[in-house]
Amino acid sequence: MKITFHGAAQTVTGTQHLLRINGHTLLLDCGFYQGKRAESYERNLTFPFNPRGIDAVILSHAHIDHSGNLPNLVKSGYRGPIYTTPASAHLSNLMLMDSGHIQEQDAEYVNKKRFKRGEPPIEPIYNLEDAAHVAQYFQPMDYEEPFEPVPGVRAQLVDAGHILGSAAVSLEIEEKGRKIRLWFSGDIGRRNLPLVRDPILPEQADYMIMECTYGDKPHREPLAAYEELRDVVKKTVERGGKVIIPAFAVGRTQELVYGLHRMIDSGEIPRVPVIVDSPLAINATEIFRAHPECMDAETNEFIRSDRHKTALGFDLLTYTRSVEDSKALNDRTDPMVIISASGMAETGRILHHLRNNIENPRNTILIVSWQAPNTLGRRLADRETEVRIFGETYQRRANVATIGGLSAHAGQTFLVEYAQAVKGSAQKIFLVHGESGPAQALTEKLAEGGMGQVAYPALHSSFEV
Ligand SMILES: [Zn+2]
């Protein structure tokens, strides 16, 4: 068997691992590389392998850095199955359509600049229509249901506890009379995350491809995030202000809604309106509701005993789909919580809410995830006092609060436990999906625990096993 690391190699995004087994080719994930615009365009546009030569794809989960280049794969001639869980197939359809729309907008933006310079226009990497073509290739597989993606390979998807439908991939490979067990972690979740089940640890693997995003630091407990959210809402409402939360539409928004639902029902926070203002989040929420099989026991128990009979809806919660309803929120002065996308406050409806509320010292802007450098979200998290929104300068007088501990990725402590689970059997662990700092820190931690066979493969490098 040959493993080639065509993405998320010595970086975080763009996961694509190619396996060559018994003369067949299997692709683990087909992620989008997300970096600077021009570099991302080049890297995502052309594959370093022939898409027509792939026999099967296994998709670990719906995040764009794992699924985002599937439309281009199909556009480039791939016609085989894409094995993934039913929830991931469902969620990927939604996210890929959204991504297709973003690719179209991006190309339009670039082309305006190119036109001014007298340069020919570029094509989007894929468009909405290309994204819609992917759905027919999904081959939904339940967790732990065995399947044979290519001859001689017995595969299973195992709950990764990262986002709705997320999976690790367990492969039992028979090649030339030899048996090899390969475990691909996908993105590793955490224990006690809201909504989803806890990740399942790997068993008995000869080789493991493992993510290491937070290999250098342990996380705070999810419960701490719940308490921080509660305190921020309470304080802001007491001052008569609004809480404005830029949040990713898929995953983070649903976690916040579930948390606020519990807080309001239990009287931990005052009964204030909660608004989710993002069409993508609304569609994603419907998919969460359609997949109770992915929810943890605590959530299902909550739904059973809840008077609204759902984790993601309650009497004070409003989902606003139309632009008119979104704009109507501007005129309201009563305390409320507004959750809106995008998660880094770069685009989308959140910009209107920030513009309307940033200069009022009663309000709080709540940052609930890591913010990339040079984004508005990062400038807010850094508590800059003057920010630009829609090309105009605003004085930030609203409070800024940040909540850690909500990450959907395992921190260092759990990553070590995860790797230790294959200590007796693993001949090599390949660390992927992490920058060099975290990878090195995790490698050192693992060495302390007696695990020396750790590699950090370079982009496009291959290993014969
Ligand atoms: Zn992910």
Image: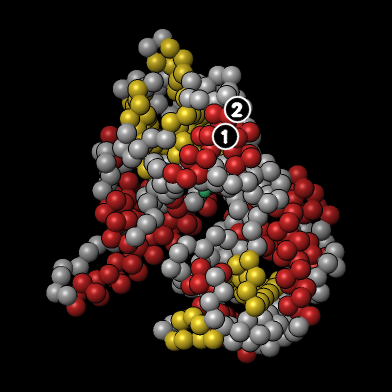
Q: Report whether the residue tagged 2 is closer than 8 Å to ligand 1.
A: no
Image quadrant assignment for residue 259: bottom right
Picture coordinates of residue 450 (x, y %)? Answer: 57, 24
Q: What amino acid does circle 1 point to?
A: Lys
The CA distance from mark 1 to mark 2 is 7 Å
User: Which of the two residues, 32 or 37, is positioned nearer the viewer here?
Assistant: 37
User: Which of the two residues, 102 or 147, is positioned nearer the viewer here?
Assistant: 102
User: Which of the two residues, 111 or 375, is positioned nearer the viewer here?
Assistant: 375
Residue pointed to by mark 1: 445
The reply to whether dot 1 and dot 2 touch (C-beta < 8 Å) is yes
**Can residue 336 be seen in the rendering of this structure?**
yes
User: In the rendered view, would you say 301 is above or below 4?
Assistant: below
Please give the label number shown on residue 463. Answer: none
Residue located at (73% from left, 72% from top): 233
Residue pointed to by mark 2: 449
Residue located at (37% from left, 57% from top): 35
40 lies left or right of 383: left
Picture coordinates of residue 403 (x, y %)? Answer: 65, 62
Residue located at (25% from left, 75% from top): 112
| Count of marks placed on residues | 2
